[in-house]
């Protein structure tokens, strides 16, 4: 074996190890936030930040080792209701942190892309329900139609959640849904 082969094998080994990395990287964008605003990384449901950073030139970042893929959230300290949830999984996750509740986005890894797709679908259906309920109907026939439409949207929302759980039954997203979502019993 010559020296070129050894270097080639070493380079291949380094690349292979890099691909097998157990680290996560969060590339965050917070363009609506001020320079120096505090960004907190929290375990979902936790009360204390696991890590804190600040906005620099409209961006923020977190890095860490994945011990277990779990649901976390990122929020600006001054607007905690504008948080975004995501899974810490190996790879690069991109987070767009917005100042309007429910508008932040997550992408970049398989689970987080699925999570965002589910979040978007449920939000669309939820907005349709809210729109229907803003205009209560006066007569009984119209009220029954309204109830039927809301029930149909609720069923679609539940089906969307259950389909995502089924598609992801062998990963932490499916496990999370199965442990935390109780499907309603429709009549």
Image (spheres, grey):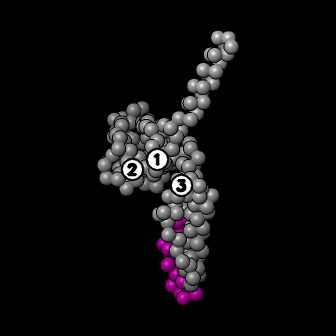
User: What segment carries the magenta color?
Assistant: 123-143
Left or right placement of residue 130 versus residue 15 in this view: left
SS category of the residue bearing label 1: loop
- Closer to the chain start, of discs 2 and 3, is 2
| Distance between mark 1 and mark 3 Cα atoms | 12 Å
Is there any visible trace of residue 42 in the rendered image?
yes
Which quadrant would residue 50 be assigned to in this image?
A: top left
| Distance between mark 1 and mark 2 Cα atoms | 12 Å
Q: Which residue is mark 1?
A: 68
SS category of the residue bearing label 2: strand
Residue 42 percent location from the top left of the image: 37, 48
> What secondary structure do most residues of the magenta stretch adopt?
helix
Vertically, is 160 above or below 3?
A: below
Q: Which residue is mark 3?
A: 173
Residue 166 percent location from the top left of the image: 61, 61
Give the number of the mark in front: 1 or 3.
1
Vertically, is 99 above or below 17?
A: below
Q: Nearer the viewer, residue 104 or 135?
A: 104
Vertically, is 132 above or below 33?
A: below
Tell which residue pokes out farthest to the top in this image.
Answer: 3
Q: For the residues labelled 2 and 3, say whether their Cβ atoms are less than 8 Å apart.
A: no
- Closer to the chain start, of discs 1 and 3, is 1
Give the number of the mark in front: 1 or 2.
1
Residue 93 percent location from the top left of the image: 51, 41
Numbered tag placed on residue 43 in the rendering: 2
Dividing the image into 4 quarters, which one contains the C terminus? bottom right
Left or right placement of residue 114 versus residue 66 in this view: right
Disc 2 crowd rating (10 Å Cα; few below 14, some 14-19, many 20+) is: many
């Amino acid at each position: 074996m010559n020296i070129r082969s050894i270097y080639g094998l070493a380079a291949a080994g380094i690349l292979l190890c890099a691909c097998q990395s157990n680290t996560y990287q969060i590339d965050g964008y917070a363009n609506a936030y001020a320079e120096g605003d505090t960004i907190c990384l929290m375990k979902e449901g936790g009360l204390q930040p696991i890590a804190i950073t600040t906005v620099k030139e409209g961006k923020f970042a977190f890095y860490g080792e994945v011990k277990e893929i779990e649901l976390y959230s990122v929020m600006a300290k001054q607007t905690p209701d504008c948080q975004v949830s995501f899974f810490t999984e190996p790879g690069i996750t991109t987070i767009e942190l917005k100042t309007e509740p429910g508008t932040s986005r997550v992408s970049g890894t398989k689970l987080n892309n699925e999570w965002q797709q589910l979040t978007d679908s449920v939000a669309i259906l939820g907005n349709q329900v809210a729109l229907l309920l803003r205009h209560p109907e006066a007569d009984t026939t119209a009220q029954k139609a309204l109830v039927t439409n809301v029930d149909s949207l609720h069923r679609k929302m539940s089906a969307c959640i259950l389909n995502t759980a089924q598609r992801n039954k062998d990963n932490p997203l499916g496990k999370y849904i199965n442990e935390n979502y109780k499907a309603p019993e429709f009549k």
